[in-house]
Amino acid sequence: MAAAGAGRLRRATSALLLRAPRLPVRELSAPARLYHKKVVDHYENPRNVGSLDKTSKNVGTGLVGAPACGDVMKLQIQVDEKGKIVDARFKTFGCGSAIASSSLATEWVKGKTVEEALTIKNTDIAKELCLPPVKLHCSMLAEDAIRAALADYKLKQEPKKGEVEKK
């Protein structure tokens, strides 16, 4: 008798569900975080991914991270003898906004002098990529990575203690 009752309950429930108005899946699920098309473009087609020779005197390397979210960004610049950045590469472990910020940063530093590259601000990166407030730390990481790479390059340009005496 219990099996017959369970069967009737299943059929009644199915009938109710079939007659109930169906909502699109989108309305039932949590709202998805949407990225701006510029972020998606840089994420799906990142520019300048890779590494340069960190032991080279004309290459500066910046490695920065955000412990709160786990993003890690390595950005490298290659500078010619005139002080112009001729190449830039990055490797980033992080969200789409972090990857997009790194990609954009490498595009922006190329062709600039070392001094001009120092003028790139996180607010400019965030504005270009239309980053929401919750993702602003990604653009801050990109600015920090640029500054760290430039500082490393400048440090390599200073003569070592033994070199000054030899000349």
Image (cartoon, rainbow, N blue to C red):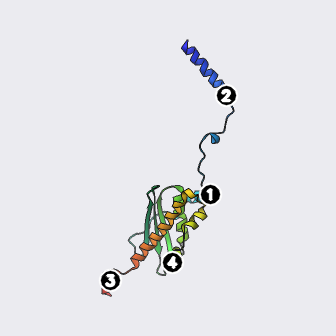
Give the image location of residue 26, x and y in percent.
63, 42
The image shows residue 35, relative to residue 50, as above or below, that is above
Give the image location of residue 24, x and y in percent.
66, 39
First in sequence, mark 4 or 2: give its number: 2
Q: CA distance from mark 3 to mark 4?
A: 26 Å
The image shows residue 43, relative to residue 10, as above or below, that is below
Name the amino acid type tagged 3: Glu
First in sequence, mark 3 or 1: give its number: 1
Q: Which residue corresponds to mark 2?
A: 18
Q: Is residue 24 left or right of residue 91?
A: right
Name the amino acid type tagged 2: Leu
First in sequence, mark 1 or 2: give its number: 2
Mark 4 nearby-residue class (10 Å; few <14, some 14–19, many ≥20)? few
Q: Which residue corresponds to mark 4?
A: 115
Q: Which residue corresponds to mark 1?
A: 37
- Of discs 3 and 4, which sits in the foreground? 4
Q: Nearer the viewer, residue 29 or 76?
A: 29
Give the image location of residue 39, x and y in percent.
58, 58
- Of discs 3 and 2, which sits in the foreground? 2
Q: Disc number at residue 163?
A: 3
Q: Quadrant of residue 125?
A: bottom right
Indicate the quadrant containing the N terminus: top left, top right, bottom left or bottom right: top right
